[in-house]
Amino acid sequence: GLCFTGWTPGARGGDVVRAVVTGAGGFIGDAVAREFRLRGYDVVPVDVRRGPGIVVADVTHPGDWEKLLVGADLVVHAAAVGTGGGGELTAVRAGVPSRSVPLTDSELRRITVAGTASVLDACQRAGVGRVVHISCVSVLGGSFPAEADEAVPVTMTGLARADALAAAEHTAIAAAARGLAVTVLRAGDAYGPRAGRWTLWPLLLLRAGRFVLVDSGRGVLSPVHVDDLVSAIAAVADSPATVGEILHATGGTGIGAAEFFGRYARMAGLPLPHSVPAALVRRLDSVDRLLIERGWLSGRVSSRLHPRSYVDLGPLALTELTRTGTYSIAKIRRLAGWQPRVGLDEGMARTEVLLRERGLLGVAEPASRG
């Protein structure tokens, strides 16, 4: 890591911490904004999408939003796209392939990488006291040693989302080298009642009879409940020792994919989904890419012919579901004094309560696939 002078909340001339949260309309950004308000922070939520109290701005381009950073003690950069968040959910019905959110790889890179550079440059010009950049453990791909720590080198995976996130991390570390007090926090498989990628997508696909286990669900996941993730972000922001560092934040325990997704099946009163070989999913991914390249994949494709009517992982990548290792969280424990406190049983119980309150578990899906 790089050395900086320490930063503590309220140290910039006032008792109230002023925190700007980008991507505040998303799952993680919204949870961070809510928690910081409970802590008494003056929170400025920013997102490209409209929402209650949100300042609408596109942080990938220079604009008036940069004025919001002047005098800010803390910026949490959680703006992201192409992550399979709740805002990217499409109609999920039995026997009907989902219509993908139109997003090219080049646009994903522009928003993820150039957007991060835009925010960090603006933070440096505005003299922001502290920045936490949210990344993801998927930057390490699917092949890494057991208990992989932050020293494991990041390599290009060939997956647009993971590679864009890795490039954004490099942008953040370059900003740290220029003197910006920034930390990269790699979130584990974040789940909770508003989590699109690891909760809503799998649950809705399960109910539609389209979600599957890959290789019998032997892959190892590293789930972290959103409440733990938010506490990790706050701990990192409060710790001068984490500046210039890359840190992992997971639940600290590897969980088999069959057990993890089986929790959602039990919530919905459904059997465990059937298993398909990884080779089949890999072949389907190749076919989808070919159809997209040739302009043949659209919402008008026959539901009875499209394989995604029967085998669908939503936004989850095959590499994420076939991992064999986990990620070390020793570094964040040492530097920020953080450790997860919400185990899988408690985290899933909290998730189920809110899913039921929102009617996502109480209505049966149609049995027909046509």
Image (cartoon, rainbow, N blue to C red):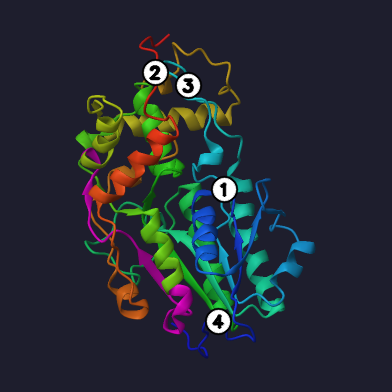
| Cα–Cα span, label 1 and label 3 | 21 Å
Residue 304 placement, left or right of 292: left
Three-letter amino acid code at the position of disc 1: Val
Name the residue carrying label 2.
365
| Image location (x, y in percent) of residue 282 | 35, 34
| Element type at mark 1 | loop
> Residue 97, which numbered label?
3
> Residue 81, which numbered label?
1
Magenta residue span: 236-258
Q: Which comes before the other along the chain, label 1 or label 4? A: 1
Relative to the observer, which residue lies in front, 109 or 136?
Answer: 136
Three-letter amino acid code at the position of disc 2: Glu
Q: Residue at x 69, y 77 (%)?
A: 71
Q: Residue at x 53, y 61 (%)?
A: 167
Residue 298 placement, left or right of 138: right
Q: Which comes before the other along the chain, label 1 or label 3? A: 1
| Image location (x, y in percent) of residue 262 | 24, 35
| Cα–Cα span, label 2 and label 1 | 29 Å
Q: Quadrant of the N terminus?
A: bottom left
Q: Quadrant of the C terminus?
A: top left
Three-letter amino acid code at the position of disc 3: Pro
Q: Nearer the viewer, mark 1 or mark 4?
A: 1
> Residue 177, which numbered label?
4
Q: Which comes before the other along the chain, label 2 or label 1? A: 1
